[in-house]
Amino acid sequence: MESERKILNLLGFFCPIPINETRIALSELSEGDIIEVICDDRETLRDIPLLCKRLNVSLLSVEEESGEFSFLIRNSAVLEEI
């Protein structure tokens, strides 16, 4: 079974929206699927890694370009419905 890759564009949104939307998106993915979360809220540099740790999912990479942050996350846990 091939993994799905989803992009979640959260440019222009500020805390807590990026965290809430990322949590919801992860709950809709199958185990092994990958999501790329794109944000421009600097707080996400702290909040998304903490969310990943709390949800036991894998933060594969964090990149920054021109004030935009890209988080690559693999859903490595089956999450309960919110």
Image (tube, rainbow, N blue to C red):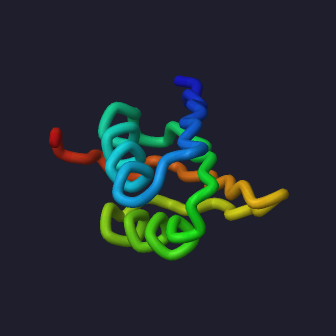
Residue drawn at point x = 54 percent, y = 42 percent: 10
Q: Could you say where residue 82 lies in the image, as x and y percent from the top left? A: 16, 42
Residue that appears at 55% across and 52% down: 73
Q: Residue 16 vs residue 76: left or right? A: left
Q: Residue at x 83, y 58 (%)?
A: 65
* Rendering coords of residue 20 (x, y %): 32, 50
Left of 59 or right of it: where is 78? left
Residue that protrudes farthest toward the right in the picture: 66
Is 30 above or below relative to 75? above
Name above or below for residue 56 compared with residue 28: below
Is residue 64 or residue 54 the one in the foreground? 64
Who's the residue at 60% across and 51% down the image? 39
Residue 2, how many percent across, how many down?
58, 25
Rendered location of residue 69, percent (x, y): 68, 57
Q: How many marks?
A: 0
User: Within the image, what quadrant is residue 53 found in?
Assistant: bottom left
